[in-house]
Image: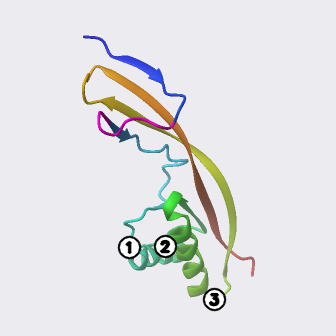
Amino acid sequence: MSIHMSTTPSKRFDEKINTVNRRPPVKPCEEPNHIYITRKTNVESQAKTAEEMLNNSFDEIYIHGMGASVNKALVFAMEVERKFGGSVKSDIQTSTVQCTDDIVSLLDLEQTDTRHRSVSAVHVHLYRAAS
C-alpha cells in the first residue's frame, strides 16, 4: 500500500469525489507572551489575560491573527492598548502565511494531493512605552 503524493497546480478540484484536510499553520513562536487569535477566541477573556501578562509577567506581548481573524486580532490589540491609557504602544506588521491542505480522493484513499494557499496575517507587538 503506497500513498501517491503530488502537488496540485490548480486550486480547483471536484468536491464530490475529494475531501480537503487543512493542516494547522506553523506558529511563529511558542513563547508564553505570544497570543494567537482565532475566530473562536473570546476577546474579553483574552484581554484580561493580556492585561495580567503586561502588569505582572512581561513588558511586551505579541498578538497574531490570520485570515478571517485579522480584524479580531486588531480590535483585540487596540482594546488592550486603550485599557492601559497610553502606557502601552503597538507596532503592527502584516504578512502572508503559506498554508498547506491535503486533498484526499474519496474514491481512491491511497491518492493524496497537496494544495498550497496564501493567507493574510497580522502581527501586533504591544510594549510598555518609555516613561
Disc 3 residue crowd, few under 14, some 14–19, many 20+, Cα 10 Å: few
Using residue 58 as the reference point, say whether residue 111 is left or right of it. Answer: left
Whole-percent x, y for residue 44 in the image: 41, 80
Q: Is 14 contained in the magenta span?
A: yes
Q: Which residue is mark 2?
A: 50
Front-lying residue, 99 or 45: 99
Q: Is residue 40 above or below residue 102?
A: below
Q: Which residue is mark 1?
A: 42
User: At numbered mark 3, what does the secondary structure look like: helix, strand or loop?
Assistant: loop
User: At numbered mark 1, what does the secondary structure look like: helix, strand or loop?
Assistant: loop
Whole-percent x, y for residue 16 in the image: 29, 38
Q: Earlier in the sequence, mark 1 or mark 3?
A: 1
Q: Residue at x 50, y 37 (%)?
A: 11
- In this rendering, the count of numbered labels is 3
Image quadrant of residue 40? bottom left
Q: Looking at numbered disc 1 in the image, what kind of residue is underneath it? A: Asn
Q: Is residue 2 above or below residue 19?
A: above
Q: Residue at x 55, y 79 (%)?
A: 80
Disc 1 residue crowd, few under 14, some 14–19, many 20+, Cα 10 Å: few
Front-lying residue, 20 or 63: 20
Whole-percent x, y for residue 93 in the image: 69, 60
Q: Which residue is mark 3?
A: 85
Q: Which residues are magenta?
A: 11-18
